[in-house]
Amino acid sequence: MIRFDQVSKRYPGSDEALRGVSFEIAQGELAFVTGHSGAGKSTLLKLMAAIERPSSGTVLIGNQNVSKLRPRIVPYMRRKFGLVFQDHKLLYDRNCFENVALPLYINGVTGQEAAKRIRAALDKVGLLGKEKAMPITLSGGEQQRLAIARAVVSRPSILIADEPTGNLDETYAADIMALFHAFRQVGVTVIIATHDAHGINSIPGKMLHLDHGKLTVS
Ligand code: ADP
């Protein structure tokens, strides 16, 4: 369960990015965060993942109050999350297999167990045949899917994606949305931010619409 209670966020020297935002997302639910550019979508996702902290209000992930987490605890909390951000930060000097391996190696999973999980994640996003390929040789859509494989390889219970279909043509975008829907169906909580409502009508989900930092839930 993710709960925001009267959350506001102001970055130093700027206007409020979020203003008194309250909502709840149940475990296994899929939610879209929509709104114009600058509406506060990325900020909302960053608060969920404890990348940013609220200026006021409470962010609860499960029973944990993210605002009150000791810095030492944050990396452990973050293991619950798979994050797909816009600059997907692939390692261009490593092949696809190695890119997906990274979060596992960081968590101490190596060897056969790691290899099995990496192949399963690549398979899920349709890239099993590209294990040895370097990311630069992949299309934009394939690179997005690789970033998703890396985000899900540690079996997160919450998947957060910021504009995962940005700059992709409609076919790729539909594939990626279908992929998120599939994760949801196996019990993963999925939160997707997108500035364009196009293409999300086909997938049922909670809508969190932001307008200049204010939320309307439908
Ligand atoms: P969106 O994802 O909907 O485009 P953001 O959450 O990125 O919106 O931004 C919301 C507002 O907060 C914008 O006005 C943006 O300029 C501001 N903002 C975002 N990040 C920062 C930051 N690190 N420092 C200062 N202002 C920021």
Image (cartoon, rainbow, N blue to C red):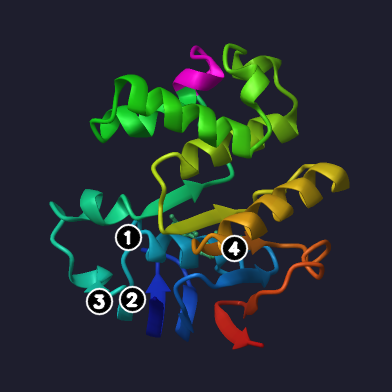
Residues packed near mark 3 inside 10 Å, few (<14), some (14 to 19) or many (20 plus): few
Residue 26, placed above or below residue 91:
below
Give the x, y percent position of residue 15.
Answer: 48, 73
Magenta residue span: 91-98
Pointer 1 or 2: first along the chain? 1
Q: Nearer the viewer, mark 2 or mark 4?
A: 4
Q: Amino acid at mark 2?
A: Val
Labels 1 & 2 near each other (Cβ < 8 A) = yes
Q: Residue at 41% of width from left, 47% of height from top?
A: 155
Please tell me which of labels 3 and 1 falls first in the chain.
1
SS of the residue at dot 1? loop
Q: Secondary structure at mark 2?
A: strand
Q: Residue 90, image x and y in percent? A: 52, 27
Is disc 4's CB within 8 Å of ligand 1? Answer: no
Distance between the Cα atoms at labels 3 and 4? 23 Å
Q: Which badge, 4 or 1, comes first in the chain's sequence?
A: 1
Q: Which residue is mark 1?
A: 50
State how far apart marks 1 and 2 are (Cα). 9 Å
Which callout, 3 or 1, points to the residue nearer the camera? 3
Q: How many other residues sit within 10 Å of disc 1, few (<14), some (14-19) or many (≥20)?
A: many
Residue 87 lies left or right of residue 106; in this view the side is right
Give me the residue at 61% from left, 64% from top: 38
